[in-house]
Amino acid sequence: MDVQMSVQSRSPQSHRKSDPLAILALTGILIVALWSALLFEQRRNYEDVSRHAWSDAAGVARTFEEHVARTFNNIDAVLLVLRQAWVDDRSKFETKVRIMQAAYDDSLLVQIAVIDANGKLAYSNLDPNAAPVNLSDREHFRVHRDRSADELYISKPVKGRVSGRYSIQLTRPILTHGDHFGGVLVISLNPSYFSGFFGSLDLGDGGSIALIGLDGIVRVRGIDLKLDESAIGKVVPSDRPFMNADAADVGNFQAVSVIDGVKRRISYRQMNEYPMVVAVTKATEAVFAEHERLWLHYKWGAAVVSVLLFAAGAWLARAVRLQYLLKAHLLVANDSLRTLNTIAIQAGAELGDKFYKALELGCKHLGVEMGVVGALYDNAYVVDKCYSTVFTDLKEGDELELPAHHSRDMFNSHDVVIIRRGSQSHSASLLSNEVFEHECFIGTSIWIDDTLYGALGFYSTKPYAQEFDDSDREFVRMLGRWVGSSIAEDRAVKKLTALATTDSLTGARSRGYFTAAVDDEINRAHRYRRPLALILVDLDLFKRVNDSYGHHAGDETLKRIAEIVQGLLRTTDLFARLGGEEFAILMPETQEHEAAIVAERLRSCVSNTKIETLSGDVRITISAGIAQLKTGEDFKTIYNRADSALYKAKSLGRNRVESAGSSTVIGV
Ligand SMILES: Nc1nc2c(ncn2[C@@H]2O[C@H](COP(=O)(O)OP(=O)(O)OP(=O)(O)O)[C@@H](O)[C@H]2O)c(=O)[nH]1
């Protein structure tokens, strides 16, 4: 059978790549979205924290300013009262000083002192008998003496010669007799009073408060709830906004401290009544510490989620891609099988040809060199068909050693088995290595109605030429089923054909088959002018057998006689039961006298045979009429002549052979 078949290669030409890519793109978008949302949230949170930090610092600065102003106002009031007392009555002055001391404890009040017009210490509450040290170099003394205006002066912090402590000095001039400069009244305040005032307020690590003169000199600086003595008297850089005369009275800025190098957010307020600025600071690092800590957690969390998302996306994309590949492979395999089926049906292929085409298709599809369909008998594996591009010695009927391991697994499991050289079960191969040095194998058992028939296997000599995948597995499984169903179909067709062409009782050809075949033989005999003889055989007095032994014995007799006749004929002779107890024998290449010899032999054999039936032994004879095909004769006429000869044999007493005889027979 010449069957043309186009087989697609195992690699599908195209498959949908867009979906796996879309999954990856979606994963990428999700990751970008996650990070965008996170960055947005981080920015928002940063600005929130920043805003709160500014507003906290501004609030504290406002309160601090009020506190300082209130304190300065109170102390100024005290200065006025004490100055009046000093001028009026010394003892009254000392009484008021004691009252002041009691009212303002050590936490605020460091010293109350009076300097006379010559700059000599005239009084100190710390040591009423103190030596009259010269304090004319003090800033406040010079200011009051030179200005001669009655105003409060807040001097730069100094370390007291008497107290030995840093203090902020609030002073007023003493005016006598028509506003003449009579000295200076000094109240020294403890800077810690200001720095410690905010002990209950949390400015965070590195947060500070400061009182700074418009001259840029630090009066007080408290940091981490303690007075920072080292900062007292330091000059702040001139680039600070509050140092600018045009700057707003209230403001915020960020700068690195010249004192400790820490970056801070600073909220300042210029005091209304005094040439002072209050500044509240928060260390930038401390402000954002919590924010940074959270952000670090979020970053790690997002990184982990991103990695997981990516891994899940990649896994999904790969799974989808494999799915598409598998589907594409299976479609190719399915198409190939459909092609195979169509071709096989259209061409009315023989089973062997079907096997061959299936093996050819399998080899091309899988990219291997050899395919074998074999049947399994007790202890042997017999080749039904082999297709090979490299090896041709293996042919139909070759018997192979019964395979071990992998094919046994295959036979046991109904499933597809894949073997690669080096794997454990390779050692015992389906085909010994002397026959075919194969490196990899894929095969499946063939089952017909739950009965093991054999196996379908494909082999490659190339070591890792093939990575058999799930689609190959499915392809071989489908091909195995196809081969199995082809065998089953072939068997069914043969059975049906046999049923239609054979007489079910005697096993001789049926009347229908005989009638169809006889015309072909007659035509051939006429065309090639070859002799053709027809013998009609009829059992003698068969009715009596039925009557005497029963119908079943009659059947047995018919069957036995058919066996005898069939056994004495050539294979080219066509023996058929025409009906009842009448048989016909069409004998190509046979002349009438030769047919007569055969008929005589049949007659003799039957008459000498005792036919054993369940009802007893039957003895029967046959009569035969013979005719040889004449020129231009058809079946009907040759039949009639043979039938006449048969009639004659019956008439002449049965158990006889009679020939029609004719001078015009062909093939003599
Ligand atoms: N048991 C059995 N009997 C059959 C079958 N077909 C036909 N017969 C019988 O064969 C007998 C034929 O009888 P007849 O036609 O009278 O011929 P005969 O008895 O053989 O007599 P002659 O042909 O004249 O020798 C009939 O009784 C049929 O019933 C069959 O398939 N089985």
Image: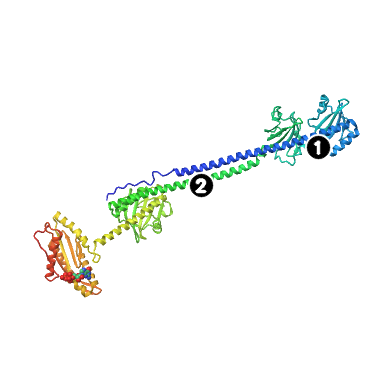
Location of residue 41 by image quarter: top right
Q: Amino acid at mark 2?
A: Ala
Q: Which residue is mark 1?
A: 108
Residue 202 visible from this viewpoint: yes
Q: Residue at 72% of width from left, 38% of height from top?
A: 60
Sequence-first disc among 1 and 2 = 1
Tag 2 secondary structure = helix
Residue placed furthest toward the top: 146
Q: Which residue is mark 2?
A: 312
Tell me, for residue 87, which label it has, or none: none
Tag 1 secondary structure = loop
Say whether residue 501 is left or right of residue 251.
left
Location of residue 193 by image quarter: top right
Q: Residue at 58% of width from left, 41% of height from top?
A: 38
Residue 461 visible from this viewpoint: no
Q: Amino acid at mark 1?
A: Leu
* Residue 396 in picture, x, y percent from top left: 30, 55
Total number of numbered labels?
2
Tell me which image quadrant ligand 1 sits in.
Answer: bottom left
* Residue 415 in picture, x, y percent from top left: 40, 56
* Residue 643 in picture, x, y percent from top left: 14, 65
Name the residue nearer the viewer: 507 or 469: 507
* Residue 260 in picture, x, y percent from top left: 70, 34
Badge 2 residue CB within 8 Å of ligand 1: no
Q: Residue at 36% of width from left, 46% of height from top?
A: 9
Say whether residue 163 is left or right of residue 576.
right
